Image (cartoon, coloured by chain):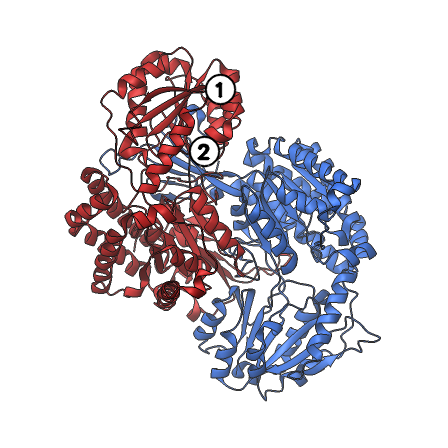
Chain colours: A blue, B red
Amino acid sequence: MAETSSTMDAAGIAPRDEQRRDEDPVVADVEADVEIAVRLAAACGVDRSSRTDRARWLTVLAEGLEAHRDELVALAAEETHLSTTRLSGEVTRTATQLRFFAGVALEGSYVEATLDAPDASLTPPRPDLRRMLRPLGVVGVFAASNFPFAFSVLGNDTASALAAGCPVVVKAHPGHLRLSRRVVQIAHVALVEAGAPATVLALVDGFDAGTALVRHPLVSAVGFTGSTRGGRALFDLAAARPAPIPFYGELGSINPVVVTPAAAAADVGGIATGLAGSFTRDGGQYCTKPGLVFVPEGAGFEQALVAALAGATSQTLLTDGIASAFDAGSAALAARDDVEVVFTGDPATDASAPAVIATTTGAFVAAHETFLEECFGPLTVLVRYADEASLDAALAVLDGSLTGTIHHEPGEDVTALTEALARVAGRIVYNGWPTGVAIAWAQHHGGGWPATTASVHTSVGATAIRRWLEPIAYQDAPAGVLPPELADGNPLGIPRREDGVLAAGAAE
Amino acid sequence: MAETSSTMDAAGIAPRDEQRRDEDPVVADVEADVEIAVRLAAACGVDRSSRTDRARWLTVLAEGLEAHRDELVALAAEETHLSTTRLSGEVTRTATQLRFFAGVALEGSYVEATLDAPDASLTPPRPDLRRMLRPLGVVGVFAASNFPFAFSVLGNDTASALAAGCPVVVKAHPGHLRLSRRVVQIAHVALVEAGAPATVLALVDGFDAGTALVRHPLVSAVGFTGSTRGGRALFDLAAARPAPIPFYGELGSINPVVVTPAAAAADVGGIATGLAGSFTRDGGQYCTKPGLVFVPEGAGFEQALVAALAGATSQTLLTDGIASAFDAGSAALAARDDVEVVFTGDPATDASAPAVIATTTGAFVAAHETFLEECFGPLTVLVRYADEASLDAALAVLDGSLTGTIHHEPGEDVTALTEALARVAGRIVYNGWPTGVAIAWAQHHGGGWPATTASVHTSVGATAIRRWLEPIAYQDAPAGVLPPELADGNPLGIPRREDGVLAAGAAE
C-alpha cells in the first residue's frame, strides 16, 4: 500500500519516468506480460462463440463468485476496509450483473439484426443488405478502487464485453490486487470447466502494464472507472495511438441535488437523513455520491443535517492515496473564507470523518471550478439559494455529472428544474438518492465531461454492451457465409428489423 | 481555387501559423462568424422540437433541393467538374436521404425508449427507470469535396443530425463554396416557411473556421468526410479539447477486392468490365473506389481490364490539390521497380487519366504500407496471387477499409475469404462493386482505422443517427416531466422495450 500511495493515485496512474522503460528490467517484464495476455486473448476465438455459450460462461462466473463468497469478502475487507456486509452485497450485485448480461446476450436484440430486401427501383438501387453488430476485439478494462467486485475483474465492463464476444484483459487496481488475482483464478477454473478458453480473461498489474495495454495494437477498446485525472491521461494515450480506439472512461462526478422550498418545508428532517445516509455510505466512496446540494435558505437544512449526522462514524478510506486526497480536499474547502464548516470530525484525531461545508449561490458561482471538483469521500457541500433566480444561476454553471437529483413535493412543477439538471446529468432522480445504481435495461450511468469521456454510452445497464460492438453489413451475400442472426427465416428467433419494420423475436 | 490548392488539401486542412490569429483581422472575423453561428444554433430550440416537426423540416429541405435542381446542378458542375448526369443523380440521392431520415425520425425506435417497472426484491432494488436517447447538441459537419450534395451542406451528416434534433454548423468545402452558399439559402427559406428556426443550420468557411468549430465549447460532436490526413488533424483537435467530443471521421479507404480463380475462369471479361466502370466512375473520386484488386495469376485479368478500358477518358478532378496528389501518387507507384504499369494515359498530355498498376503478392506484402495508401482518383492496383497461401498472406496485412469485395462462382465456399475481409472491412460485397452506397436501414458505411476514426458507428444508413444522441434515464419521475416517448401507455405508439421485452409500436 505504501508503494501505491506514494506513486499512484486512486486510478493507478502515476507520474511517469519515460526513461524507465529502457533501464528497468521489471518494465520489460511487465510489457511481456501485457503482450502475452493480449495476444492470447486476441487468438482465443471468443468472437466465434455463440451467444448461448457466452451466456453459460457468464452464469458460471456468477456461480464461481457466489461459491467463494466468504473467502472473497474476507480478502476484500482486508484490502479495502469496506464492511463485510457491503462487500457481500457487492458480490451479489456482481453475480446479478453477470447473469443480467447473460440474459442480454441470449435475448439477442443487442446485435441489431437488420435485413433489407433488394429494390432496383431506388436511386441508388438497393441490393440485398444485412447488418448486425459484431465484437470489436480485445477490450482493456481498468478496475476501480471503490467496487472491488462490481467494477473490477468481473464487473460491468468485463461482463458486458464478454457478453458481446470480446476477450478482456483487466488492469488490476493496486488497492485490491490479491483479491483481483484470486477472482481471476476462480474465473479461470469456472470458464475452463464450462468449455471456455481460459485466455478469454487475463489480469495484468502495475502502472506500466496499464499504459502498455492502452497502447497495444491488438487492443480495440478500453473501459475505465476511476479518477478524472487518471482517466484523462489514459484517454489521451488512446486518442494518440497511430490507430485511435474508443476509451470509455467513467470518471469523477459531483451529482448535484436540488431540494425545493416546498420539499424542505414538508420534511426537512427526512431529506437531511436521506442525504446523510447517501453521502456517508461506505465512506462516501461512490461516483454517485451527492457532493453538491442546493437547499433553500432559512429552511433549517444545515441543522437537520447535523442532527442526522449525530451518530456518524469515520470510515477508513480505500487507499492511503484516497485518504490523503480527501483530507487535502476537505481541508482546502474548510479553509475558504466563503464557506462555513457545518459539520466535521476533528481532522487531527479523526481523519476522513464525514464533513459538511456550506456556502451561498453567489460564492458558488464565483468559485464554481473549485466547488465542482469532486472530493472523493464523505463530504458534501450545501449551497444555500435565496430564490429561483439565484438557483438558476448556480445550476447554469454546473459541469457534466452522472446524476442530478430533485427533492420536491407531489404536484410541484419540476419541469424547469429537470431541464436544468438534464443539461448536465445522465440520470435524473426524483425524491430519492443517486447512490445504489440499479441493474436494468433502462439504466443509464453516464454523463457529460468530466463525468465521462463518452456521454454517448453507458457503463451500467443492458446497453453497456454497445460499447464493445461495431457494425458489419453483408451485400448480396451467399447464404452460407451469413451468421445465423441474419439468415433467412430468422432461425434463432431474435428480434430483427426487416424492410424497416422492427419485429420482436419468437422464442426458440 | 488557387488559394485552395496551395494552402489546403482535399479536406480543407492547411498547415497552420499559430501566430496568425493575433495578427490577422480576417482570422478574428472568422472566429466571430463561428461564435455567432454556434451560439445561435445552440439556442435555436431544435432539441425541444417534436419528431413530427423535424420529419416535416427534412421533407421540405428535400423539396427545396429538387425545386432548384437545374440551378444547383449547373453551379456544382462548374465548381466540381463532375457531369451533370452524376450531379442530378446526386441531388436525387440527397433528397432521398433527407426523406429517409424523416422516416427514421417518425418511426421513433431510434430513441430506444426503455421502461423498467420498480422491483424492491432485487439487489440493488430497482426503482421506476425510463431511458431514451436525446440530441447531443450542436453538431459540426465538414463537407466533402467529392459529394457536393450528398455529403455536404444537406448530406448524410446534416440529415441524420437534424433528424436527431441537433442543430448543425457546416464547414463548407472550398471546392464548392458557391454551391454551398446557395444550398444554405434555399434551406433557410424552406426551413423558415416550414416553421423551423433558420439558425438550426449555418455555414462557415475557411480553414480557421474549421478549427474554431471543432474547438468551440458548445459544439458537441463533429462529422467529417475527407482525407485521412485532414481527418486525423481534426480528430486530434477534438480529443485534445478540455472537454473532448466525439469526432466521426470517414476518411480514406482502399476497398480491397478478391477475384477467385473460379470467378476469373468463368467470366474474366465481365468482372474486368465491372471493375473498369467502378474504379473510373466520376474520376475514381469515391471513398468506396476499389483501389486494390487481388487477381489470380495467369487468368488474363490485366489484358481483360485493358480491353475494358479501351474507351476510357480522363476526368478533370475535383480540385487542383486532388489532381496534384493523384498525379504524384500514381507517378510514385509507376516508378517503382516492383510494379508494372498495365494501363495509363500519357501523363504529359493527359493528366489524371485512368491508370492500372500491377504487382505480386510478395511485393505487396513487402511494401504494403505504400500500396495501402489511398490514391484518390482513377487508379487501381492489381495484385497477382499464385495460390491461396500467398493470397492469405497478402490479405493478412490489410488495414481498415470501408468495404471488401469478393467475386466468386455460385456454390464456392467463400467463408474464409469473408472472414479475411471482415477483419478489416465494414461492408462485404459479393459479385458486385462497392461504389454506389445504398440508403437503407441495414446499410453500414464504416470500418477500422484508417478508413474511419470510429468503427463503432456509420455515416450512411438509418443508424447514422445514433452518432448524435446520448442516453438519459429518469428515476421515479413524476409523469409531468417525462417526454411522451416514455409516458405510460405509449401514447405515441413507438417501438419500446418494457420490462426487458421489445415490442413493435402501434401506428399512431
Question: Disc 2 marks which residue?
Answer: B373
Badge 2 density bin: few <14, some 14–19, many ≥20, Cα 10 Å: some
Please tell me which residue is depicted at 74% across the width and 41% down the height of the picture.
A22
Q: Which quadrant of the figure contains the C terminus of chain B? A: bottom left
The kind of residue tagged 2 is Glu
Please tell me which residue is depicted at 68% across the width and 76% down the height of the picture.
A333
Residue A100, above or below B272: below
Badge 1 density bin: few <14, some 14–19, many ≥20, Cα 10 Å: many
Residue A226 seen in this snapshot? no
Of marks 1 and 2, which one's residue comes earlier in the chain?
A: 1
Q: Nearer the viewer, residue A301 or B244?
A: B244
Q: Is residue B300 left or right of residue A141?
A: left
Q: Is residue A348 left or right of residue B340?
A: right
Q: Secondary structure at mark 1?
A: helix
Task: Check the image and name the residue furthest to the right.
Answer: A349
Rendering coords of residue B173 (x, y %): 32, 50
Total marks in image: 2
Q: Secondary structure at mark 2?
A: loop
Of all chains, the one bearing label 1 is B
Question: Disc 1 marks which residue?
Answer: B361
Q: Is residue B279 left or right of residue A334?
A: left
Rendering coords of residue A424 (x, y %): 50, 66
Residue A50 seen in this snapshot? yes
Rendering coords of residue B226 (x, y %): 39, 44
The kind of residue tagged 1 is Thr
The alpha-carbon separation of the residues under discs 1 and 2 comes to 16 Å
Quadrant for residue B410, please give it.
top left
Rendering coords of residue B277 (x, y %): 28, 27
